Image (spheres, rainbow, N blue to C red):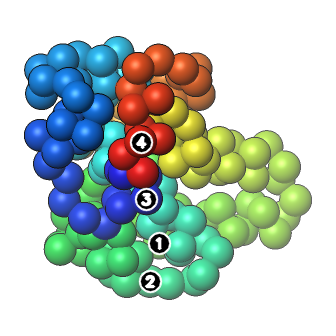
Amino acid sequence: MINRQYERPIRVEELADAVNMSVSAFHKHFKRVTAMSPLQYQKTVRLQEAKRLMLSEAVSASEAAFRVGYESPSQFSREYARLYGRPPMQDVQELREAAASGAGETGGGTGGDTNGAGGDAVGEITNGTGGDTGGDTNGAGGDTGGGMVVGAASRLE
């Protein structure tokens, strides 16, 4: 549900109900699998999808922000910079320049960031907890392939 409907606000109660768990048990299992809360996970998924939109569809940062569910482009920019280390359009421009110059390592890293949360487990989100969260998030998401939350996520989607 989070990966498919990332632009909508999530209600943890609905997620827990969908997998027949209490809210506290759901939080505990979700965090064990993803190393973050459901809201952090959703934020990461949103930011990764916005990055994909800016890179592949050449939309502006504001347009990407609105399309992934942010109501404020400035909040989006702050959270994007917190996760990726630089403002959205600067990041996208540098990634495009690196790709054009044939820097394969940068392209590989970008794919890892973009697919890390959205493609793995239940997804990943950063709740503005700092720059190193992005690194932890991608590592955790890449390592989690099973578990109760992952199985539950397929029912939620």
Q: Secondary structure at mark 2?
A: loop
- Precedes in sequence: disc 4 or disc 1: 1
Judge the density around disc 1: few (<14), some (14-19), many (≥20) Cα neighbours within 10 Å: some
Q: Nearer the viewer, residue 85 or 8?
A: 8
User: What residue is at 75 percent from the left and 45 percent from the top?
Assistant: 108
Q: What separation in Å lies between label 3 and label 1 (alpha carbons)?
A: 25 Å
Amino acid type assigned to the residue bearing label 1 in the image: Met
Q: What separation in Å lies between label 1 and label 2 (alpha carbons)?
A: 8 Å
Amino acid type assigned to the residue bearing label 3 in the image: Arg
Amino acid type assigned to the residue bearing label 2 in the image: Ser
Q: Are marks 4 and 1 in contact (CB under 8 Å)?
A: no
Q: Which residue is mark 3?
A: 4
Amino acid type assigned to the residue bearing label 4 in the image: Arg
Q: Quadrant of residue 39?
A: top left
Q: Which residue is mark 4?
A: 155
Q: Residue 36 appears at what percent x and percent y? A: 30, 28
User: What residue is at 81 percent from the left and 69 percent from the top?
Assistant: 100
Q: Are marks 2 and 4 in contact (CB under 8 Å)?
A: no
- Precedes in sequence: disc 2 or disc 4: 2
User: What residue is at 47 percent from the left and 17 percent from the top?
Assistant: 147
Q: What separation in Å lies between label 2 and label 4 (alpha carbons)?
A: 33 Å
Q: Which residue is mark 2?
A: 60
- Precedes in sequence: disc 3 or disc 2: 3
Looking at the image, the residue that sits furthest to the right is: 102
Q: Which residue is mark 1?
A: 89
